[in-house]
Amino acid sequence: MSAPSTKPVVTEREAREVAEAAREQVWRKPSFAKELFLGRFRLDLIHPHPMPPAEDARRGERFLAQLRDFCETKVDGALIEREARIPDDVVNGLKELGAFGMKIDTKYGGLGLTQVYYNKALALVGSASPAIGVLLSAHQSIGVPQPLKLFGTQEQKEKFLPRCARTDISAFLLTEPDVGSDPARLATTAVPDGDDYILDGVKLWTTNGVVADLLVVMARVPSSEGHKGGITAFVVETDSPGVTVENRNAFMGLRGIENGVTRFHQVRVPAANRVGPEGAGLKIALTTLNTGRLSLPASCVAAGKWSLKIAREWSAAREQWGKPIAHHEAVGSKISFIAATTFALEAVLDLSSQMADEDRNDIRIEGALAKLYASEMAWLVADELVQIRGGRGFETAESLRARGEKAVPAEQVLRDLRINRIFEGSTEIMHLLIAREAVDAHLSVAGDLIDPEKSLSDKAKAGANAGVFYAKWLPKLVAGPGQLPTSYAEFKREVDLSAHLRYVERTSRKLARSTFYAMSRWQGRMETKQGFLGRIVDIGAELFAMSAACVRAELLYTTEPHGREAYQLADAFCHQSRLRVEELFGRLWNNTDDQDRKVVKGVMSGTYTWLEDGIVDPSGEGAWIADATPGPSEKENVHRPIR
């Protein structure tokens, strides 16, 4: 059996329909963030701050102590950066420690850690070497363990999870050379052949793929008699005949990760290795990412904590004009931003993770917001650290060491963090994904009204439904607890956080009104207003972060000796966040979107090519997108299993 060599050709509407079909269509549980976008500030869903059971906490703390000792004695982050590889003995040591089975149930040989402690572990090990954090999170957050935990059969769990817990490394393969965030164009195929499937195709940017023993592969099953078809998930043994790792890719950061290009040619995969039914692959991927995305905020929190430590120590040691640079306002404001933002990022991460553990709320938006917000803000934090360090921030740690100074890898952290704005959904895609979920309530009642392909009778019915919904909903956006000075009084201590929560409540209603106005104005063209939607989402992200920061501050006030200081950090963050929110609201209606579209049209038509005169292009020869035609590999297999 051979796979077709032509790539799927899909229209924009067909691509949307594929993505829409993969969405979880029903909200079976409450969602704090969903309510926030609808103008309903449900503080009761996150306050009091949820806490892990005592035994889970004890088990998690025990492992963190072991992992800290391992990181301090066995991990040389500078060596990994220098040699662009995690030593095999480090990987094997992590296997023995159980780090590859942190999220796997104890009955399958794993540690059974909660999401909270899993993320704490990723932050800890990621601070020693971000490449190790990626290795472990790609294996567990999106690799074989998580999809099997959610969708695997009992037989699949018993067969694969013990291997993943202690010996085998896994990877997740979705992206292709010509397919990123548009899975409707997926070209890799899995053709049914008796009790097997024949896999053909090429996958790009397979994190862990170079060293993986097991792969989760997304492939298109053609429709046929007895086969529903569609994008489907499979567990594939990397040593199967026809699997070739053709390249190990290199990047500006995260130099130690084992990321490659993997080709499948006539690879026979047993039907027993199919995860879920045919056509459920994208839904499995999206559901896996709901919590899987929380691994990226963990690395961002680690970077924020380290940046704060270095900024504090350096700004006390470095003097300028007669006093430490920290005492100059221009530098002090940067230190304040780093400290306050790090506090908020940890608040968002811990709250989202604990909500995932509780499983009381639907966190699909919260998880996406955490990934979006943390990746953007951590990048700014690291950039500010480089600025505070000045020329030393631009200098490599090896160069600093060579001339006798503390080997601070500030520029490396900046490089390592940059990919987080692209990994597991770029910022632009996250804006669209979150915006779709945020307006779900509107589309569920008025979607047919703005769909040009719906009949007049469908539009009439949708209009009636929309009228009922908005008659009840819009009046509730006029007034709320945020206008009462006594609201949220339990957050008023030496520092008053209640005012910030009242601001969040008022602003969530303003955000909902703005979304409604935009839908009324643009109707079916709303989905093309990506600049507007991105700002709507960014406002929601700030409101979520403010809420999380206040709730965490109150938790720490009642449980930790540094509660007063937590209140101070939350207060500073909320003041900074409110300035960003007000700027975003101003840019909803006063922006350069129209002018930008005109310039883009001119650029793409060649109108401004004269602006490119006076340079040489150092780019090498080659295709913009590598050929991914199915067929046998012509390259050496660089697969390198670690034993």
Image (cartoon, helix red, strand yellow):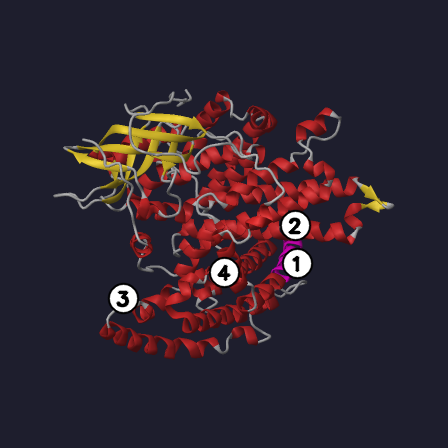
Mark 3: secondary structure: loop
Marks 3/4: CA distance?
A: 25 Å
- Nearer to us in this view, 344 or 525: 525
Q: Position of residue 100 (x, y in %)?
A: 43, 32
- Residue type, label 3: Glu
Among numbered discs 2 and 1, the one appearing first in the sequence: 2
What residue appears at the point 26 percent right and 76 percent down from the top-left corner?
A: 460
Q: Is residue 352 left or right of residue 454?
A: right
Marks 2 and 3, how far apart at CA: 51 Å
Q: Which SS class for mark 2?
A: helix
Q: Main secondary structure of the magenta part?
A: helix
Q: Is residue 589 above or below residue 344?
A: below
- Of labels 4 and 1, earlier in sequence is 4
Spatial separation of the CA atoms under disc 4 and disc 1: 28 Å
Residue 295 sits above or below residue 505 on the image: above
Depth check, front residue: 396 or 236:
396
Disc 1 versus disc 3: nearer the observer: 3
Quarter placement of the C terminus: top left
Could you tell which of marks 2 and 3 lies nearer the N-terminus?
2
Provide the residue designation for mark 1: 572
| Earlier sequence position, callout 3 versus callout 4 | 3
Farthest residue, direction right: 322
Provide the residue designation for mark 4.
531
**Residue at image mark 3:** 453
The magenta stretch is 563-577
Q: Amino acid at mark 2?
A: Ala
Q: Height in image: 394 above or below 347?
A: above
Estimate the spatial distance between the alpha carbons at disc 2 and disc 1, rounded to whole Å: 9 Å
Please state which amino acid type lies under the numbered disc 1. Ala
Q: Position of residue 80 (x, y in %)?
A: 56, 26
Instruction: Between label 4 and label 1, give the one nearer the viewer.
Output: 4
**Are the residues at dot 2 and dot 1 in contact (C-beta closer than 8 Å)?**
yes
